[in-house]
Amino acid sequence: MQRTIRANGPNLLLGLAMAAAAVLILVLTAHLTFFGDCWEFLMNRRHLTADALLEPHNEHIVLIPVLIMQASLRIFGMTSARPEFVLLVVLLLAAAALLYVYLRRRVGPWLALFAAVVVLFLGPAYEVLLWTFELSYVGSIVFGLAMLLALEREDQLGDRLACLFLILCFGFSSVGIAFAVAGAVAIGLGPRSSWRRRAFAVVVPVALFAVWYAGWGHNAESHLSLHNVLASPRYVAESIAVTVGALLGLGTDPTTGSADPVWGRALVVALVVCFGYRAYRQRGIPVGTWPVAAAALVNWFLTAFNFIPGREPTASRYQYLGAFFVLMVIANLLQGVRIGRRTVLAGFAVTALILAGNLVVLKYGKNFFQEQTTLTRSDTAALEIARPTVDPEFALSPEVAGTGALIDVSAARYFEAIDEFGSPAYTQAELETAPPAGRRQADLVLAQALPLSTVIEPGAFAEPGAGCQRLPAGEKPETALAPGTNRIEVAPGGEAKLSLRRFASGEYPVQAEAAPGGSAVELTVPADESPLPWYLMVEASQPAWVCPAG
């Protein structure tokens, strides 16, 4: 009995770690919504057309992620991203389990367990763990790993499965190119007599990818340049260093999520020396190293060739796949190594220390996405409130929305989507109790979407009669504005500053054009979907009067 428990202990512990990771990620993402590239899918790829399915996204084929999104919309609607987060968790668990199987075949269960657990809670890769768009990335890793494991069967069934898995790998993203190289090298390292028989496992998926590229993929925007090519060796070296540092919980600032490769550089040098010495003693490098090493290099070099700002080696999402490649290379270099009880205990201690640091970074990632969710739900709520008068072409660009999270979201597209699948925005009641940053941003978006407008008539001051509210000088009072054109009479004197708020409290985020003394201002407030009034504050050294619309 004890022998059975000891033998199955790593499997049981991995199961517990996977359950804990699933619960943690689902808790961290419980209140998150769609972010970034997800909106490009929601706005432009909701319908089952060839272009929607096959148009490239940032050089990638995204056939299966778009199908997943379309199925989710039709089953669950657009009110919540929760269904896609659940699927993301399933794929993350599958990736960790397949990595464990791959590593266990080479270095035994305990080292495989420690590596898989680190990947499950890889805080520096928080973008992959907490962003549903990374379904495309994780899906390719899952089926790429499955393809390599199927090829290791070296039989007809294994090769057929490998072919299917590589097709699915390509269907998720163009990361399939790296795994296709791995598959080709793995088959090429086998007996020559088997090459022709087994080649279809790679040739068929690559041929299908080539068909896609000829039809749609060649239209993708490319950032290939001579500068990127010449800079690629440094880029690849930095990618390896950042990944190694992330795996050991070193080099990532827990307060900003930014990675510094300085620790990783030293660790990479140490690893190269150690494994170089081991290869010298063993008179060669294990054959299984080459497929994974080739895939890793192809992936990093292709990324380097297409570098633009935002695709630095330190980018969070790149550290996830890099972690798989580094661990797989190391496992092959350590092939046959088995560890004793003391080393296992030391492994538990080191893994715990790594997790402690990585979980702090993961908490930073959660806070980042929560802030983006607040802005996203506030921006879209404001757009819905302004629906009666907003220009159909009005776009939630970064300058308007206060975030770059809303890609390709214009009023017309957004209203069409929510009419069909429901709204992920705050309700008006939720917006009134949203975090201050969200309420402030809603006011800024509303002011431009409605839009609020002012017309200043210099020298047109006329002291109003009954029905107008007098705002005393120097007291910074506020007054509610009715929908329509409100007239503000500014007595002679200095310049009057006009600012407004609606959902915000304690601040007036919307700045209207300042009015000179002795002027009249017509401030138009279009009627919209909210009964909450706008509040105007006039800051001046002389009194002013606000005469309501009508």
Image (spheres, rainbow, N blue to C red):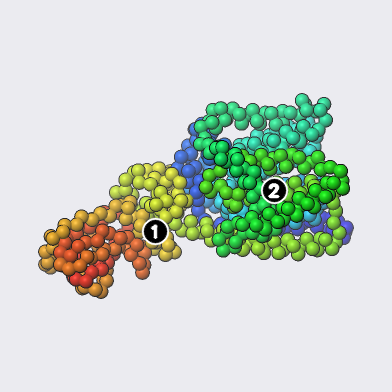
Q: Is residue 146 visible?
A: no
In x, y percent, where is residue 124? 62, 56
Quadrant in the picture for the C terminus: bottom left
Rendered residue at 79%/34% (across/down): 189
Rendered residue at 57%/59% (across/down): 257
Q: Tell me the residue that label 1 is attached to.
A: 441
- Apparent side of residue 313 relative to residue 382 in the rendered image (left or right): right
Q: Tell me the residue that label 2 is attached to.
A: 324
Quick one: label 2, few (<14), some, or many (20+) residues within 10 Å?
many
In x, y percent, where is residue 331? 78, 48
Q: Earlier in the sequence, mark 2 or mark 1?
A: 2
What is the secondary structure assignment of the residue under circle 1?
helix
In x, y percent, where is residue 371? 49, 59
Looking at the image, residue 219 lies above or below residue 269: above
Residue 308 vs residue 527, the one in the foreground: 308
Residue 126 lies in what quarter of the image? bottom right
